Image (cartoon, rainbow, N blue to C red):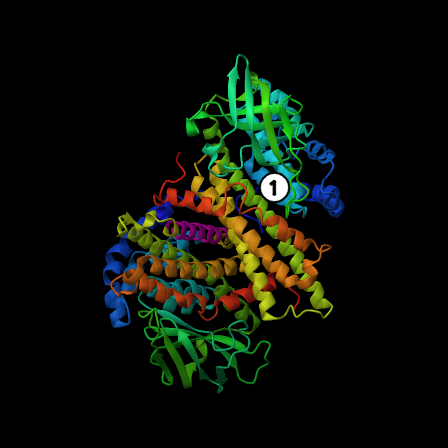
Amino acid sequence: MSHWLLTEKHEKLRNDVRQFVREDIVPYVEEWEKEGEFPRELFCRLGEAGFFGLKFPREYGGNGVDYVAETIFLEELAKCGSGGISFSITAHSELALLYVSEYGNEEQKQRFLVPGIRGDKVGCLGVSEANAGSDVAAMEAMATSDNNYYVLNGSKLFITNGAKADFACVAVKTQRNAGRHGISLIVVEKGTPGFSVSRKLDKVGLRVSDTTELIFTDCRVPKENLLGRENEGFYYIMRNFTWERIAIAAFSLGAAELVLEDTLEYVNQAQRNGRLPSASETVRCKLADMATAIEVARAITYYALMLFSQGISVSKEASMAKLLATEICCQVSDEALQLCGNDGYMSECPIQRYWRDNRFYPIGGGTSEVMKDIIARCLGIGKKRWER
Amino acid sequence: MAPEMQNNLAFFDEAHKAFRHLVRRFRKQEIEPHIEEWEANKSFPSYIFSQMGQLGLLGTRYPEEYGGLGSDYFMSVVLMEELAYCSDGSLPLAVAVQTEMVIPLLLQLGTEEQRKSFLVPLIKGEKIGCLGVFERGNEQDLASVQTTATCDGKDWIIRGEKPFSINGALADFVMLWAAISGKSETDGFALFLVEKGTPGFVANRLDQAGMLASNTAQLVFEDCRIPADNLLADGRQALEVVTRVLHESRLILAVIATSAAEYIFEQALTHATQRVQFGHPIADFQVIAHYLAEMAARIEATKQLNYVAAWKLARGENALKETSMAKLAAGRVVNEVADKALQIHGGYGLMKEYPVQRVWRDYRLYRVIVGSSDEALQASIARELGLVE
């Protein structure tokens, strides 16, 4: 469905990404899913195609800032059918690169953003800890100052790309007992002594993305690796959350669309073979509901996107988009599994993988419940539990 | 989240804003103070239509030569958003029948003379029209109509009945859809205009759970004789136009439902911040806060879907899928929001002096309204998705 927000340029980009996904990812998904990883070369291919530069300035190898274009990329990437592959790619492009671009100095941009846009270097973001999820200020990882170095101790949990990343943007406390006022972002390169990555964590879905624990033991990092200003990291993280939420909404939208497309095909095929009464009211109504829910999600996501790309503060709308798009993606995936029946449950059918993969989206990047807390705060209600 | 807060720079210009304020003032002065009285009387006074006509509210996007404002589709969206931002469901629906169903049908199918004698007074608000199109069983297929029109060489004789006609008890005339006796099932139907007072035509007022002031009636035609000139159009062309107009009107119903949802959400939000229990406003409790957060999110999302569909309609594109989706989503949202609003109000919500119960009752109709029920919408959407039948 065409939309008032999209220009011809965007429609062309959509076709380009779609073609890339169809040729360079889709044929290998089953194989990579079995192996539990995908070749790192895919990052280079995406870089060559220019897809990492859609929201970055030309001077760093980007295509000029266009968040609408980035959204199209995310939607179409999610349609590769492997949440793990697309999630890993976006942990690099939407998290790591965005932090360097937004808060890094010129030298840091040359070191990380430029090769990152080319796909030669892969990044990850380390914020979450065992006891600090949405409550970022509760983190415990600490960086103490030692002349020209920071000395890092602590660990970061559930870090996508942890194992394959060449650099990690890590949030740590640079001031004790200062809560949100004592957090800084520091880039730690792979191979830095005292920085290690745990085993890959085994999980229900997104199995191709490597999710790890980052461990820092007296890890010495030069102070020139500080992103932005000391003790302002919390606000940087909060600011990036807005885009992150719109990005996850867009990503969920693409994932949900793929589920719908596959289900329509399954149902129509079954109907042609006389195996399933797709003419039955129930099946038709369910599919109509799924399609409607997806367009509802798209409407709010594009609205938040439109405001965001005009520089308007959209904490509320981004949270609404994240809440609805991720929940709808899960509901649609569950309905799809129901419609495809026992066929859909079998490992050879991608529907079960969508169902497993997509379950993460209402959890990652701020849970649905946190989204509701934020919306409530924007409405001027609810207790301010999250302030520390 | 009142309507003026929306930030859709792309759709609304200064003229839309000025019009919004005009309609809002009208709603506050001429509608809101009378809602309970109209409900008790089972009708709004018909002069409310002429008042609206004088202000130009009934001809938003229709040609100036017939008294319209000649504006765009978004002007109609603004009109309905503002009219429906209150606890009365009856008047917005009555206006929608006039401006989104009867007027476009006359404009597209009427002769120049019919436009002069009916369209102009409709836009002025001097006449009120109603629809006699749907019957039990033809909701998704207008071709299978039971009401018949027989030609006796000079006049048409109408026989049959139409249930659930909004405005029916008040209307000056009805746009009637009937099968032509003796003609084929594939093109033997036509749209007629039947005036009030024609012998053999009776409108029986119906009692219902909500929409008490909507003048909904059952229209009965017993050997009702009308002149040959009162046939507006027949055959496939008539079928196509009537179907398209009714499909497009789904979007205005979605706009009305969304605005009513916004209104009742604001009522619930206000109540939750004022009602104190256990020493705190109940809005401080996370359960209530989350209800309200989800209500707000769903309202904003359906509103944005309405605009997506409106944008397509305004460009003259086929938007059957989008308008049906918008109506399906909005009908559910207003019902869920009204139900949660009732819950947040607790016992107060069920009291007649509180607006929430009226929205809760009135808008239940939207999910079952003939021609645009959830099931009819799902059927349209499934077809548009390309599901093999």
Which residue is label 1 attached to?
A74
Image coords of residue A375 (percent x, y)? 41, 45
Does residue B281 sit above or below B361 in this rendering?
above
Q: Which residue is at the front of the view, B343 or B168?
A: B343
Image coords of residue B321 (percent x, y)? 55, 59
Q: Which residue is at the front of the view, B247 or B334?
A: B334
**Image quadrant for the C terminus of chain B?**
bottom right
Q: Main secondary structure of the magenta part?
A: helix
Does residue A359 sit above or below B348 in this rendering?
above
Q: Is residue B284 magenta?
A: no
Q: Which residue is at the front of the view, A8 or B195?
A: A8
Q: Residue at x 73, y 55 (%)?
A: A348
Dot 1 falls on which chain?
A
Image coords of residue A47 (percent x, y)? 68, 32
Q: Is residue B300 magenta?
A: yes
Q: Residue at x 72, y 39 (%)?
A: A38
In the image, the segment drawn in magenta is B289-308
Image coords of residue B128 (percent x, y)? 34, 69
Answer yes or no: is residue B70 visible.
no
- Callout 1: helix, strand or loop? helix
The amino acid type found where label 1 is placed reads Leu
**For the view shown, which residue lies furthest in the top direction?**
A147
